[in-house]
């Protein structure tokens, strides 16, 4: 059982609902574990900075709200108790991945990470679309013909940011490239 799951277990024995406790006193973000009225497990970020609009999930409700004290919350609530283990892992990954974030960029860091998880969950079993295949081929051709000879294998491949959904497909010293392909 993870530390987060243990905390949810302790909170579930409390009689008052909702009930929240801070995850970690040393984490730079104000992250709280919570249990709500219907026993829903929640991970909540409290921040001075307004979070970006959250992505939508089927099994997780993500709600952004403004508090009376002038701060913002971003609450991730599990809607399907049968998915507690993967939700715990998602929350644990969010906690770990934001451990070096500052309080002002914390909401954006959480949202970026949630969006990556959403993209992972939405990947089709049928593979890439036709345009996705064309884009990948274009990136690989550029990598092979121009970037490998100029920057070397290690630097060229490390500079390939396209698979991560970055704004540019390649970021190398003094160079940023966005590859576009057409039919």
Image (cartoon, grey):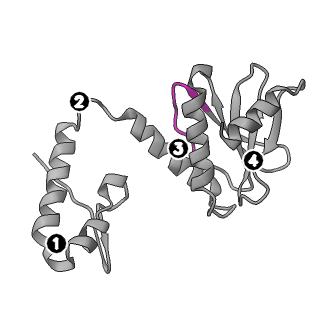
Residue under the image location 20 percent in, 71 percent down? 153
Residue 92, how many percent across, how many down?
Answer: 61, 44
Mark 3 / mark 4, whichever is N-terminal: 4
Task: Tell me the SS state at disc 2.
Answer: loop
Residue 147, how many percent across, how many down?
Answer: 18, 72
- For residue 87, say whether it is visible: yes
Residue 116, how many percent across, how many down?
Answer: 45, 46
Residue bounds of the magenta highlight: 53-61
How many neighbours does mark 2 have within 10 angstroms: few (below 14), some (14-19), or many (20 or more)? few
Task: Tell me the SS state at disc 1.
Answer: helix
Describe residue 86's horizontal placement relative to residue 125 as left or right: right
- Calculate the distance from the C-alpha at mark 2 to the C-alpha at mark 4: 39 Å
Q: Predominant secondary structure in magenta?
A: loop
Question: Do callouts 4 and 1 mark residues in contact (Cβ within 8 Å)?
Answer: no
Residue 106 falls in which quadrant of the image? bottom right
Describe residue 1's horizontal placement relative to residue 55 as left or right: right
- Calculate the distance from the C-alpha at mark 3 to the C-alpha at mark 4: 18 Å
Mark number for residue 126? Answer: 2
Residue 47, how many percent across, how many down?
Answer: 73, 53
Q: Is residue 157 above or below residue 55?
A: below
Is 30 one of the magenta-colored residues?
no
- For residue 108, say whether it is visible: no
Residue under the image location 63 percent in, 28 percent down? 78
- Calculate the distance from the C-alpha at mark 1 to the C-alpha at mark 3: 33 Å
Residue 131 falls in which quadrant of the image? top left
Mark number for residue 114? Answer: 3
Q: Is residue 65 above or below residue 171?
A: above
Mark 3 / mark 2, whichever is N-terminal: 3
**Front residue (pair 42, 68):** 42
Q: Which residue is mark 4?
A: 23
């Amino acid at each position: 059982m993870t530390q987060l799951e243990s905390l949810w277990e302790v909170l579930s024995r409390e009689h008052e609902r909702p009930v929240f406790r801070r995850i970690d006193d040393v984490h730079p973000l104000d992250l709280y574990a919570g249990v709500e009225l219907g026993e829903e497990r929640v991970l909540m970020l409290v921040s001075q900075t307004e979070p970006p609009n959250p992505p939508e999930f089927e099994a997780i409700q993500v709600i952004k709200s403004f508090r009376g004290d002038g701060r913002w919350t971003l609450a991730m609530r599990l809607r399907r108790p049968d998915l507690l283990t993967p939700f715990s892992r998602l929350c644990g990954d969010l906690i770990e991945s934001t451990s070096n974030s500052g309080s002002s960029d914390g909401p954006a860091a959480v949202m970026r990470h949630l969006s990556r998880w959403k993209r992972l969950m939405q990947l089709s079993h049928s593979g890439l679309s036709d345009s996705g295949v064309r884009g990948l081929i274009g990136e690989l051709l550029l990598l092979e013909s121009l970037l490998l000879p100029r920057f070397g294998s290690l630097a060229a491949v490390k500079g390939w940011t396209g698979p991560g959904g970055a704004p540019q497909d390649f970021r190398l010293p003094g160079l940023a490239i966005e590859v576009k392909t057409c039919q």
